[in-house]
């Protein structure tokens, strides 16, 4: 993926969205709470703005713009993540212009279970595509 670099600051009160999928969990969880490929990018991906499930799905290449049942989103703010000692960077790509990277203050440090717990504490309850059960 080609990164366009840093494009401005994200205010503490800016809402950020994370996409998740109950039917395709990562390590048993519908939302990623740790870097999936820390050898490539030691960060978790979010999106700028308070996006609906359909809006979030529309940010992914090779996807229809309509979410499936079981897909969802959850929200936080940049400030909530920073209070938990995470760095929040706007890192748009040609495939996702709203991409945000969340990493430890020391990005070289391995992401721990404690980091995942602090990351999860920053979010409210998820919103799932209508028709699915929580």
Image (cartoon, rainbow, N blue to C red):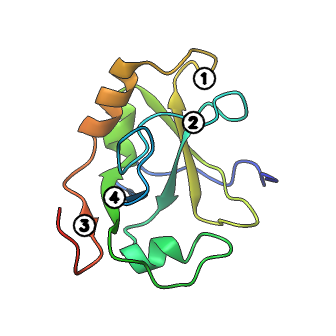
* Badge 1 density bin: few <14, some 14–19, many ≥20, Cα 10 Å: some
Q: Which mark is residue 107?
A: 1
Q: Which residue is mark 4?
A: 22
Examine the rendered structure and indicate whether residue 58 appears above or below residue 41.
below
Q: Which residue is mark 3?
A: 127
Instruction: Please give left or right for residue 86 compared with residue 30 in the image.
Output: right
Where is residue 49, by image quadrant? bottom left
Residue 39, position as x, y percentages in the image:
71, 27
First in residue order: circle 1 vs circle 4: 4
User: Marks 3 and 2, how far apart in space?
Assistant: 23 Å
Residue shown at the point (35%, 44%) measured from the top left: 29
Mark closer to the observer (2, 4): 4
Quarter location, residue 17: bottom left
Q: Is residue 65 above or below residue 78?
A: below
x and y, in percent, of residue 126 in the image: 24, 59
Residue at (41, 50) in percent of width and height: 25
Q: CA distance from mark 2 to mark 4?
A: 21 Å
Contact, mark 1 vs mark 3 (Cβ under 8 Å): no
- Under tag 3, what secondary structure? strand
| Secondary structure category for the residue under label 4 | loop
Can you give x and y, in whole percent of width and height, for residue 82 in the image?
39, 34
Find residue 43 and name its label: 2
Q: Mark 3 or 4, which is nearer the eye?
A: 4
- Residue at horizontal 54%, vertical 35%? 35
* Of callouts 3 and 4, the N-terminal one: 4
């Amino acid at each position: 993926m080609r990164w366009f670099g840093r494009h401005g600051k994200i205010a503490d009160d800016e809402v950020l969205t994370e996409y998740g999928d109950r039917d395709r969990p990562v390590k048993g969880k519908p939302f990623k709470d740790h870097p999936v490929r820390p050898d490539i990018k030691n960060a978790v991906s979010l999106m700028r703005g308070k996006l609906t499930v359909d809006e979030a799905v529309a940010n992914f290449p090779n996807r229809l713009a309509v979410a499936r049942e079981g897909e969802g989103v959850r929200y936080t703010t940049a400030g909530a993540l920073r209070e938990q000692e995470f760095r929040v960077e706007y890192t748009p790509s040609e495939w996702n212009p709203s991409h945000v990277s969340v990493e430890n203050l020391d990005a070289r440090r391995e992401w721990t279970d404690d980091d995942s717990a602090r990351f999860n504490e920053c979010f409210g309850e998820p919103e799932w595509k209508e028709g699915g059960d929580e």
